[in-house]
Amino acid sequence: MVSVIIPAFDEEKTIATVVAVARTHPQVVEVIVVDDGSTDDTAARAEAAGARVVSLKKNEGKAQAMEAGVESATSDIVLFLDADLIGLTHEHINRIIGPVMDGSRDMHVGIHARHSFWLNKLLRVFPIIGGERAVRVSLWQSVPAGYKKRFQIEIALNYFSKQAGRGMSFEIIRGLERVIKEKKYGVLRGFIARLWMIGDIVAISVNLYIFKEIRKPFDILTAWIAS
C-alpha cells in the first residue's frame, strides 16, 4: 500500500479535487496533506475531502513539508503529489507508483507532458524535476538533512537514488497539468517564485554533480585513513 503526501501552501482552489482522486485509489492507504503555513482554507478543504492534515505553523518550504509528511506516513512507499494538479486520474497514479510497487525502482517520477513534440524530447535531457514521484521511504531517509531544502530536494532525491539500491526512472505523463505560478500568484510574484525555484535547482545541481564528485576521492581517502 502507498501513503500519498501532498505539500500545500494556499491551494484552496484545487486541493479537494486532488485529495478526492488520491484517497479513492485502491492502493492508497492514506492521504496526508501538509499545510505549509497557508493563509487560506487549504487545511479545512483538505480535511473535508478526506485527508489527514498535518499543519506547520509557518511556511517552511516544500522539502520541510515533504519531510513532515514522511514522518507521519505509515507505508514504506510514499507518493508525493502537487496540490495544484489538474486532470489527475487513477491511471496516472498507477503509472507513477508501478515501478516502485513492483520492486524494480526505488523512485519513479511522472513528468507532465508539454504540448510541443520537441519540448517533450528536451524533457529527457533536462534535470528530472517534478512533484509527482513515488519514493521508497528508505531512499528518502538516505538523503542527508542538509539537502532537504525547498526545491533542492527533487535533485537530491535523483542523485542519491543513483548511488545505491534500484535507482530511479521517469516517464512523461499526458493529461496531467498544474496551475503555473504566474497564474496562481500573479505575474510578478509568480516570476519571482519561479526564479527562486530555478536558483535552488542550479545550486543543488552544482553542489552534488560537480563539487561532491570532486570531493569524493578525498572523502574515500579520509575514510580509509580513519579506519
Image: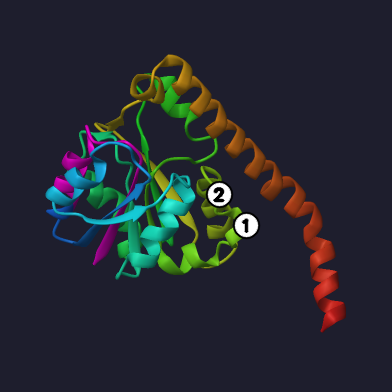
Residue 209 image offset from top left, x and y in percent: 68, 47
Q: What is the span of residues highlighted in magenta in the rendered image?
A: 1-22
Element type at marker 2? loop
Q: Answer yes or no: is residue 90 visible.
A: no
Instruction: Check if residue 2 falls in the magenta segment.
Output: yes
Left or right? Give the position of 11 relative to 220. Answer: left
Residue lying at 58% horizontally and 61% vertically, measured from the top left: 145
- Residue 149 marker: 2
For the N terminus, which image quadrant? bottom left
Answer with the quarter of the image where residue 2 lies. bottom left
C-alpha separation, residue under disc 1 versus residue under disc 2? 7 Å
Q: Is the C terminus in the top left, top right, bottom left or bottom right quadrant?
A: bottom right
- Residue depicted at x 80% and y 57%: 215
Residue 157 is at least partly visible in this image: yes
Please name the residue that numbered disc 1 is placed on. 146
User: Percent x, y for residue 41?
Assistant: 23, 39
Residue ID at (52%, 23%): 192
Residue 137, compared with residue 81, is above or below; it is below
